[in-house]
Image (cartoon, grey):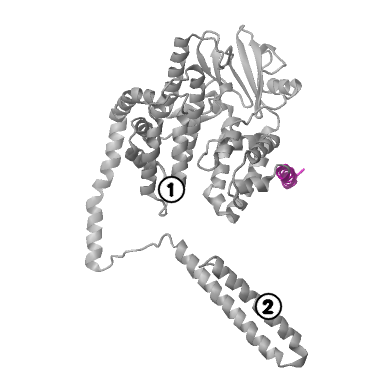
Amino acid sequence: MGPRTQRLKRAVHVGRVARRGGLLRVLRELGVWGNRPATRDGAEEFRHALEELGTTYIKLGQLLSSRPDLLPDVYIEELGKLVDEVPPVPFEQIRRVIDEELPANTFVRIDPDPVATASIAQIHTALLGSGREVIVKVRRPEIERQIDLDLALMRSTAELLESRSERAQLLQARALADELEVHLRAELDFVEEANNAELVARLLVLELIHGRKVEGDHGLGVERAQELARQFFRAYVHQVTVEGVYHADPHRGNVLLTTDGRLALVDFGLLGRLDDDTRRNLALLLLAVAQNRADDVADLILGLSRVSLSADEPGFVQELRRKLPRYHWRPLSGIRAGEALADLQRISFEFGIGLPTSFALVGKTLAQADSIARVLHPELDPIELLEEDSLEVMLREGERRLEPNQLFAWLYTQLEPLSRMPRRVGHLVNKLETGTFKVGVAPTDLTGLERALRSTANRVGGAVIVAALLIASALLARVHDLRWYAFGGFCAAFALGLYMLWKIVRTPGEL
């Protein structure tokens, strides 16, 4: 079966699932195609459809769950329930992959029953010849081909939506498809997940950790549970603000409470990576949130974001001043630490400020981290922890800036433009003296003017057509054999004239 045939077959299947799941209704509730209030039923149908379509669409839903600026709250909550679990692949197929990828007799024993099955890979316990227990993570056969097919279809759909819907353009449908591909490629690549551990192409061998999910009946003492909660949340803040590399999927299945009373992170398929400038600004942003400095929060967000000419920056600052104080002196039982960042995303979107995708992933990660901390210590105040750790963060940043390599690199980038300044000034003066100095003005934000001109041209053109129909019909009416044509022309002119009048009254300035 050729690639085009496969894509067509997959498109037909996706279309059937979308129709059963009420896709048109969902698009209206999301504002992509029409406008309709969001409902719980629509959100549930959307989630069920994504689960039925499999790996790529489940990952899409998980990615969308980190974008409260794009989706209504009811959809964010429902997509947070997406479960990445599928029936296991028969062990014979798994065994065949292991035999192809690893030397014979690598394992003394492999448990044929998987301990976990996900849409990309499944995990089996095994015993090495040395007597050490490990887990073996094996990629599902044909999963990469299926993901390639889905991504190609998703990209074409995103392009179609953006060409037909302004809301889809605002949602950045193509950018979301690109971001989804990056995440999926990272999860398919066990080299990245292993992070310099021993690995092979389709299979990964890791240490076996005995533990269980963090639940309310964890059995820990109060002081130990509170200490673990503080350490866990602080560890994530440290990863984001100091290291710039963080475990980006700390849901309850990936955080284990070990038998000796510690917390262990598993599954490093999805890592968040921040460049130094973004990491530094996020660190300062969290500190400004913790210290209730709305103006500084606004400045830092504007520095991170893409701001259009239509953005309402004063309104954005005013809204921050109104909402920021609500996150202070309240324990986790009253708020979610990630809720503050989610609110910042919503406010930014509302006032025309486009935050980078890295911000959304950090917000989702911290929201998941505080959900674990809340189980262990419901009264933990994350804002207080941020303030306590602020001195360490600033000292670490100062040390990093004063390192010789970093310091000299920074000085060079600052001084290099200054060294070229005299030459540039000389060129400018020479052009002024010779009269060759030119100034170019690039018009921006002419959408309103363009729309008004188009509307005027359309109305003038419509009026000309009506007048031409009336004149032609009047001339035809004088010819006895063509009177029915004349009557039809009068009717057409009357109908077109009524339509133009209705449009003018209903939507002034448009046609």
- Measured in 3D between alpha carbons, the distance from the residue under mark 1 to the one under mark 2, in whole angstroms, is 45 Å
Q: Is residue 308 magenta?
A: no
Per the picture, the main secondary structure of the magenta-coloured stretch is helix
| Mark positioned earlier in the residue sequence (1 or 2) | 1
Residue 309 place in picture, x, y as percent: 40, 54
Q: Residues within 10 Å of mark 2 (few under 14, many from 20)?
A: some
Residue 29, visible in the rendered structure: yes
Residue where numbered disc 2 is placed: 492
Q: Nearer the viewer, residue 302 or 442?
A: 302
For the N terminus, the image quarter is top right
How many callouts does the rendering have? Answer: 2
Write the residue at 43% across / 18% down: 230
Q: Secondary structure at mark 2?
A: helix
Q: Nearer the viewer, residue 436 or 236?
A: 236
Q: Nearer the viewer, residue 18 or 107?
A: 18
Determine whether 155 is above or below 50 in the image: below
Magenta residues?
1-19
310 to the left or right of 87: left
Residue 273, visible in the rendered structure: no
Residue where numbered disc 1 is placed: 351
Residue 225 place in picture, x, y as percent: 48, 13
Write the residue at 53% across / 67% down: 510
Determine whether 111 is above or below 320 in the image: above
Residue 384 place in picture, x, y as percent: 37, 24
Residue 363 place in picture, x, y as percent: 47, 33
10 to the left or right of 286: right
- The part of the image, by quadrant, that contains residue 464 is bottom right
Q: Are marks 1 and 2 in contact (CB under 8 Å)?
A: no
